[in-house]
Image (tube, helix red, strand yellow):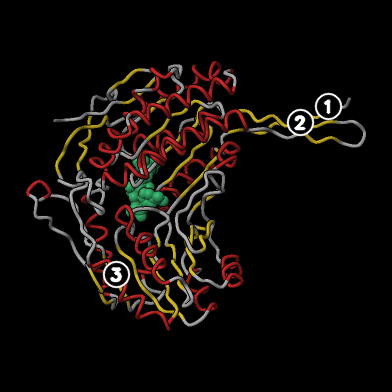
Amino acid sequence: MAQDVLNLIGGEHLPASSGEWLDNFEPATGQVYGRIPRSGLNDVEAAVTAARSAFPEWRSWSPSNRRAVMMRLADKIHENAALLAESEARDNGKPVSLAAAVDIPRAEDNFRFYASAAEQFSSESHTMGDGTVNYTLRKPLGVVACISPWNLPLYLFTWKIAPALASGNCIVAKPSEITPMTAYLLGTWAKEVGFPDGVINILHGLGPEVGQAMVEHHHIRAISFTGGSNTGAAISATAGPKFKKLSLELGGKNATVVFSDADFDQAVSTAIRAAFSNQGQICLCGSRILVQEDLYERFRDAMVAKVSKMRIGDPMNPETRMGAVVSRAHRDKVISAINIARGEGGRILCGGGRHQPSEPRLKGGYFVQPTLIEGLDHTCTTNREEIFGPVATLQPFKDEREALGLVNSTKYGLSASVWTKDLQRAHRFAAGIDTGMVWLNCWLVRDLRTPFGGTRQSGVGREGGYNSMRFFTEPQNICVQL
Ligand code: TXE
């Protein structure tokens, strides 16, 4: 059954003004299962107009009223968790078990967390000796754009729109054209829970068309973007000269570093989870596994034994732990990266190609075998460029110095996961890493209050906690002499 999605503009669900549509594919089958509006300039104009006319009312709402309506949307996510998890699995190819355990609960948490932040966010005052007082207002910006990617569709969509709304902005948001479904569903509940029309506007369509028009629009004051580094660079080039606020969460080529004193079993299982969760399509995935040389062979063999047994299957089956990658183009990109690794002299330890499930339903699906590669140094393309699929490399290192050099050898600086029982070394090593986030003896443990983001080509700015509230507000200092 075809499932079309529609734009949300000024409280109305609408097709693109051009009347054009794009196909939406189910990655597990390779079949079209619905259509999305191919929006453009006119749709952006209509959404911005709706957002601008809603802004005076929305900014005047008390923090507790904003909190209440956001909590009601979180309740809706909770009540519809099973529908959302199934929709995410169908749209993205990820296992429904993962969507149900991670993506959808986190989307609900994002809304609850920032609903509370609406009430708890505060600004500062500074008194001077002579009785002069400075107080700083934190004003919402007006209309802001939130542009999110396909890997964690509702999770990252809500991570952006919730703080934007909590701080009093009206939004024009665009989910990835590859995974539009859950953002669409969320929008269908906005009016019912009490958002005034025009506060939440959601547009669907292609990045270079509708996304670009959003970034260019004169009345859009800030852009919060998560996606590839090249897209981030294109958005910066457009938004920079227009002096828009920008928050960019981009790619990563993260290292998992295992010293020989690490807890072996935990390090093996977490390194596997870090490399292959969500088919390796998380910006925080550890795609370079660095192991101290005296442990290297044992660690490698243990990983290969477990990864070779990973079962790939139908994302809609609750037992499946590894599903399809997101699109045909992305599958081809991942397979080509594996072939580049071969060409560079990499030894494929397991996987190394497409996977063909036996079920007829999955015949045209985009499945890739979980792949481990060794024998490549840090200068080769495989260890420098983000692959963003179920592919990881293993490299031995001699000592702390060499490991640190390897960790910091890429243009990215998002995250790292370090495994050792030596506390002093752990802290010393973590401080030397040039990434925005480091996990010691764990991976992807998240406290939503902490700064989230990367250095260098992994992005600009930090999200999370008050970082996002500050991003979506403009400080204005008022100095009064009493
Ligand atoms: O993402 P894009 P793609 C990486 C990963 C992947 C590569 C490309 O390596 O292979 O990026 O993926 C919108 N103006 N990551 O092409 O293009 C687009 O519509 C405004 C890492 O799918 O970056 C979508 O909504 N918007 C990553 C969003 O940007 C534009 C997650 C992301 O798409 C635009 C995803 C434009 N000119 C991919 N062009 C992570 N860091 O988590 C595109 N968009």
Mark 2, secondary structure of its residue: strand
Residue type pointed to by label 2 = Tyr
Residue 58 image offset from top left, x and y in percent: 53, 19
Are discs 1 and 2 less than 8 Å apart at CB? yes
Mark 3, secondary structure of its residue: strand
For residue 318, above or below residue 174: below
Query: Residue drawn 45% across and 44% down?
Result: 235
Residue type pointed to by label 3 = Leu
Residue occupied by mark 2: 135
Residue 440, labelled with which disc? none
Residue occupied by mark 1: 480
Indicate which label's residue lies in the foreground, 2 or 3: 3
Residue type pointed to by label 1 = Val
Cβ at disc 1 under 8 Å from ligand 1: no
Residue occupied by mark 3: 372
For residue 299, above or below residue 164: below
Residue 136 image offset from top left, x and y in percent: 72, 32
Question: Sequence-wise, which precedes: disc 2 or disc 3?
Answer: 2
